[in-house]
């Protein structure tokens, strides 16, 4: 699965929020998209998911993304928005089953395979224990995990997830990063926006930094997440911990804490 | 609240309920008829007069109750799913109001007196004009707020034009006729009316039912629905044309009957696990049962008063609407 963006620009109203962003994803990777609020991360992800008009070119497997029909695209690429919306108090299991929609035809009768995939996705996200509960009776973190299970049930080659760890406890945050890594090991590409620099530095294979709609860095966490760059992007100091398994970048301002 | 009942059971119960109410509907009136006698032992077992009452008065009335109730219930459920708002109903998009305006114009201009079909045809045209205007106002956008506001604008416009027509009516009887017609009724309808409404309601219902899967996806919001391959423009068009056809045809023969599309989907939603795709067929059956029941009540409670059907549905529906409004408000405050 390859994904290439060439000089992608996008506007919200008259405001240009992405300027000539070029990215090439040629191998399975867990890509962390970071940058301050308003940097254009969500717009970039919505553009990749086909939800935001843009200028420039985007190719999926060497074919222009605009050449794909919406239902073809839905089998290749799944999108998790930042807002966790379920308009009706649907049963948890039914919410995850919605992810199978691109693979079902006509009246959408769920096959045995669909049920297997849904159960596996619910197991992965540890939401199987409340499969029969209505959505509005779940906690915020449970709702978040359930909607990620819906994303996984879609079985796409490319996952676009906008701040998926928001509202998750530390164990589930790490669990989600492990899940993403497992998907990468299966040959999938995961692009996720993150505000947590320690998660990004430790778990991601590649970091893309956006600032004011421009791509300012793209590379491995150690190359990209330098103290100087983070100071330049966020205006904060960082502590850098090198562990045998990887490195951790923790935003902090040691000068303020005496 | 979730109540566990298998979907197939629920549908079977609703079908049985509709059949029962249909049978009661053709039995009740000034003359009590046993429908089993008439249908199973042939025309010979009842008098010629009774046979005439049954086939020419009772049957078309019951059939209209069934198909109009189904059209209103189905379109209400579809609009609620499309707009993701439990307060939506066919009236919301201004289609009922525009259909009424079409009918009122037919009465005011005297067209309906000169040509019997003018009333229903004019109402249908009103509904179609509403759809075309709605699409023009809402543009190519699939934005829900734009559609709702277009509906509000259209309802106001149709209401103003209806008032204007009433003001300009020199004939006091015309105004009275219009007021009565606008209250909604199934009395004194014939097979002609069934023939006029049925094809449009059937076609409209097919379009509305085709939105079922997209409405399920829309539960997760527009972005997710689109990312799962749903064509929102197509869904909007299906829902709007489906509503125009079925509600336009329904309003044409029965006048404006409100609240069926609001009450029925809301009552059935917990029984189908809140799934919009399951709610659509259930609401069609539920709407049919609700309107048949209301039409029985009209004849049973005040047999000599010619109580209007729209009055009954509003008497039940309006307090229900307030209750719903209160509950929705409470829920959003949490």
Image: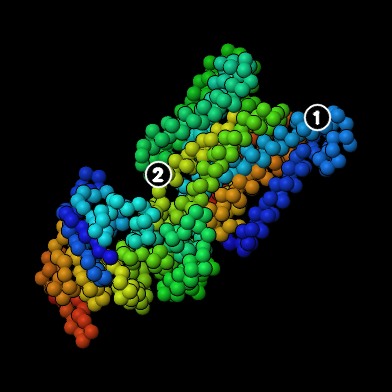
Residue A136 x %, y %: 49, 62
Instruction: Kindly state the secondary structure of the residue where label 2 is placed.
Output: helix
Disc 2: which residue: B233
Q: Nearer the viewer, residue B276 or A258?
A: B276
Q: What chain does mark 2 sit on?
A: B
Residue at the spot x=10%, y=70% of the render? A228
**Local crowd size for mark 1, using a 10 Å CA cut-off: few (<14), some (14–19), many (≥20):** some
Which of the pair B234/A209 is nearer the observer?
A: B234
Q: Quadrant location of the N terminus of chain B? A: bottom right
Instruction: Give the residue at x 71% y 37%.
Output: B62
The residue sitting at 64% across, 39% down in the picture is B67
Q: Is residue B110 left or right of residue B15?
A: left
Q: Is residue B310 left or right of residue A29?
A: right
Where residue A75 sits, quadrant-wise, is: bottom left
- According to the picture, the residue beneath numbered tag 1 turns out to be B52
- Outermost residue toward the bottom in this view: A244
Mark 2 neighbour density, 10 Å: few (under 14) some (14–19) many (20 or more): few
């Amino acid at each position: 699965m390859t994904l290439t963006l060439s000089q992608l620009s996008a506007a919200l109203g008259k405001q240009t929020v992405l300027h000539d962003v070029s990215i090439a994803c040629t191998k399975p990777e867990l890509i962390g998209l970071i940058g301050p609020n308003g940097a254009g991360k969500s717009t970039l992800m919505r553009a990749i998911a086909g939800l935001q008009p843009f200028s420039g070119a985007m190719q999926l497997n060497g074919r222009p993304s605009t050449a794909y029909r919406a239902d073809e695209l839905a089998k290749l690429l799944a999108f998790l928005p930042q807002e966790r919306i379920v308009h009706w108090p649907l049963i948890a299991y039914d919410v995850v089953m919605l992810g199978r929609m691109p693979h079902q035809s006509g009246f959408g009768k769920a096959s045995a395979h669909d049920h297997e995939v849904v159960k596996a996705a619910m197991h992965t996200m540890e939401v199987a224990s409340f499969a029969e509960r209505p959505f509005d009776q779940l906690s915020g973190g449970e709702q978040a995990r359930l909607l990620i299970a819906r994303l996984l049930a879609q079985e796409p080659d490319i996952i676009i997830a906008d701040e998926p760890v928001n509202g998750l406890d530390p164990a589930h945050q790490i669990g989600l990063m492990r899940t993403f890594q497992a998907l990468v090991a299966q040959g999938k590409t995961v692009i996720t926006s993150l505000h947590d620099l320690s998660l990004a530095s430790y778990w991601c294979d590649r970091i893309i930094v956006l600032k004011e709609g421009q791509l300012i860095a793209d590379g491995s966490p150690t190359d990209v997440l330098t103290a100087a760059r983070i100071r330049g992007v966020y205006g904060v100091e960082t502590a850098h911990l090198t562990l045998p398994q990887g490195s951790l970048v923790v935003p902090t301002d040691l000068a303020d804490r005496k | 609240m979730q109540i566990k009942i298998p979907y197939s059971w629920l549908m079977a119960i609703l079908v049985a309920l509709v059949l029962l109410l249909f049978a009661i509907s053709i039995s009740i009136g000034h003359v009590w008829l046993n429908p089993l006698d008439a249908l199973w032992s042939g025309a010979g077992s009842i008098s010629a007069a009774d046979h005439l009452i049954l086939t020419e008065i009772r049957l078309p009335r019951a059939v209209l109750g069934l198909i109009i109730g189904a059209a209103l219930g189905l379109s209400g459920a579809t609009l609620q799913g499309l707009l993701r708002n439990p307060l939506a109903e066919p009236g919301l998009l201004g289609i009922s109001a525009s259909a009424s305006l079409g009918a009122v114009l037919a009465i005011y201009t005297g067209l309906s007196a000169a040509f019997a079909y003018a009333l229903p045809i004019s109402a249908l045209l009103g509904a179609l004009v509403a759809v075309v205007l709605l699409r023009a106002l809402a543009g190519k956008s699939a934005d829900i707020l734009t559609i709702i506001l277009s509906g509000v604008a259209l309802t106001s416009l149709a209401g103003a034009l209806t008032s204007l027509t009433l003001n300009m009516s020199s004939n006091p009887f015309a105004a009275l006729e219009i007021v009565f017609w606008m209250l909604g009724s199934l009395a004194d309808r014939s097979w002609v009316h069934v023939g006029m409404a049925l094809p449009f309601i059937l076609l409209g219902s097919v379009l509305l039912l085709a939105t079922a899967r997209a409405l399920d996806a829309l539960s997760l919001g527009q972005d997710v629905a689109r990312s799962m391959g749903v064509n929102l423009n197509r869904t909007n068009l299906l829902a709007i044309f489906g509503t125009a056809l079925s509600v336009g045809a329904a309003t044409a023969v029965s006048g404006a009957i409100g609240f069926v599309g609001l009450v029925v989907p809301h009552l059935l939603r917990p029984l189908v696990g809140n799934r919009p795709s399951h709610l659509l067929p259930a609401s069609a059956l539920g709407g049919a049962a609700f309107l048949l029941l209301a039409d029985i009540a009209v004849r049973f409670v005040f047999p000599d008063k010619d109580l209007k059907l729209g009055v009954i549905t509003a008497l039940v529906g309006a307090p229900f609407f307030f209750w719903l409004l209160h509950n929705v408000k409470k829920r959003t405050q949490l």
